[in-house]
Image (tube, coloured by chain):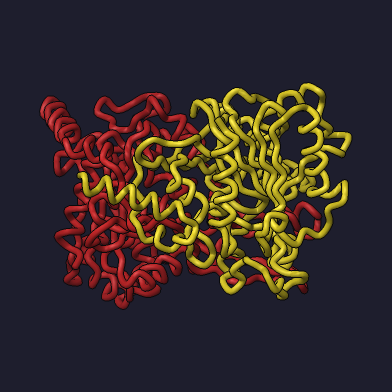
Chain colours: A yellow, B red
Amino acid sequence: MKLRFFACLFAGFLASTAATTIAAKETPLVLKKIGNFFVGGEDKSLAPGSDITVGQMYVEYKIPMGTTKVPVIMVHGCCLSSKSWQETPDGRMGWDEYFVRKGHPTYLADQVGRARSGFDAQVFNEVRAGTRPPADLPRILWADHQFSWRVFRFGPSFGEVWPDGQFPVEHIDQLYKQMIPDLNAQLPAPNPTWTNMGKLAVQLGGAVLMGHSESGFFPARAAMLDSAGIKGLLLTEGSCRTTQSTTALTPADIATLAKIPTLILWGDHVASEDPGTPFGDCKIYTQIMKEAGGDITFTHLPKIGIFGNSHMFMLDKNNLQVADVVLKWIDQHVH
Amino acid sequence: MKLRFFACLFAGFLASTAATTIAAKETPLVLKKIGNFFVGGEDKSLAPGSDITVGQMYVEYKIPMGTTKVPVIMVHGCCLSSKSWQETPDGRMGWDEYFVRKGHPTYLADQVGRARSGFDAQVFNEVRAGTRPPADLPRILWADHQFSWRVFRFGPSFGEVWPDGQFPVEHIDQLYKQMIPDLNAQLPAPNPTWTNMGKLAVQLGGAVLMGHSESGFFPARAAMLDSAGIKGLLLTEGSCRTTQSTTALTPADIATLAKIPTLILWGDHVASEDPGTPFGDCKIYTQIMKEAGGDITFTHLPKIGIFGNSHMFMLDKNNLQVADVVLKWIDQHVH
């Protein structure tokens, strides 16, 4: 038992030095608890005597042994699932496991309408049966190989890589396989994923919310609906939606958001930093929060000497180095 | 009836003494490795310069420490995902974790076309755009609350429970939330899930395949396509498809299948055991395999003193007692 205790300590020590990424992978993963459940969801009647549940959010969790740090709720981007945060295309440890090894319980959510959260299929069968017009179908999004390569910034054009690119392009087929159809166009407003993220944070007695890309601003959206459980916002590689008039922040939104420590994270090779672009908007958002007295950090990885990261930084070859930036920020800013 | 009542009590007693069950849950879960990857899948061109991947199968795995037993590949049923094998609706340990704690590496697959495996969305957007007729849409299956209750045998009719029913109906909302749309009608023949199950077994250097309900016979289907990696077949609560002429087994199929140790498992309160029903077909299948010299076991749980199990035996209150039946069979029959 004592031996085991020291083995654990040793594992913790190994995991805490960035250089020992590989060693960490080879030490056992010791979990206090692992499981999954659903948050949210409501009954919908299709016909008398026929009810289904829609709007639920699948969440899988891992709780490490010992004293734990703040839980982190991770939400994936467009045309992806929670797989984003897990094993990389080339078989290395993902952020999920790494955060757990660093003492954070993790909660990975499949967005409502996607993957294990399911979607509302009623309209599809009604259109098939001819009782509704085809135009009623929601537009389904997907990212083809060419789009992924370009938008995820693996290189300047499809098939071409950045000289310093960190994405393991030699295993890109595994990334292509994790690109799945996105039915968010079907969701009601506000997006139930936002509501469910906030609910989960409350249920956990406080959590940091992390979004990515399509969900990059979801943590803030969740906070604007209910900030009670939200201890930190990790807005990565997404739009900050501040300059579009339809989604402009109200003074009340700003007051709410400025109370929550926030990290904005961007990788390398961003095409444009201009206002109106996601990156540019996030700079403006940062300024707004600073002016409101918020604790906000804008981290552009190349500016801190970490180069070549793609949009999928959590899968890049240096993914744990990037994770360390986030983990350190949490340690320093979230209380 | 009285006898049955006491037998039931006894079963309950066994389930709760599984003194090991409760203790097991509270001891840490120590994993050598955890992760997920995709098996199979192929490129599909949507247009010049636009390719996607379809037919891939998401697989998540857990490998226990120390000497391991044979890996078990678990595949879920209709309108469900791998969630079936994990945490129960009332928060108890699922089969996935239990098998790992018993020394089996586990591989949980989301069926092709479902959950994290994604689906091919092209036809949906084409119908929406008016370039294809609505009749081209695949029929999407789902199980409404009423269907689930009845077909999963939680009770004789919706809202009513069997007196000895083992399903945790007080938490049925969590089951309803895991029911998701099923797009298998869209899949090519043979179903890529069958092919991918066989591929994965080879990749692992041998594995036992377990199917349930819709996928109850998938392990046998996989073996008929490529039996090289398949060390055992666990056919649970599904059709055995032997009496339908369109899917009758050939002598070559029978010879292949009879070489693989097979367990057929059924719970309680089966509506009919007649030929032509799934249960009845499985009895015939058992006879065919026996006549061909196969090592096959047909386990009808009430016949061995385990009562009240639903179609979702892996989520029932005595789920680990049922797991023990399967684990013992593997130990005794799979080499």
Tell me residue B157's x, y (percent): 39, 28
* Residue toward you, B331 or B164: B331
Residue B276 relative to residue A86: left or right: left
Figure quadrant of residue A315: bottom right
* Residue toward you, B20 or B146: B20
Image point (44%, 40%), residue name: A36
Image point (59%, 30%), residue name: A231
Indicate whether B93 appears above or below B261.
above
Indicate whether A318 appears above or below A280.
below
Tell me residue A321's x, y (percent): 56, 57
Asked whether residue B309 appears in the rendered view, the answer is yes
Figure quadrant of residue B168: top left
Image point (74%, 69%), residue name: B50
Residue B148 relative to residue B7: left or right: right
Indicate whether A77 appears above or below B151.
below
* Residue toward you, A280 or B245: A280
Asked whether residue A183 appears in the rendered view, the answer is no
Q: Quadrant of the N terminus of chain A?
A: top left
Indicate whether A213 appears above or below B39.
above
Q: Quadrant of the C terminus of chain A?
A: top right
Tell me residue A90's x, y (percent): 52, 67
Tell me residue B217's x, y (percent): 36, 59
Residue B182 relative to residue B166: left or right: right
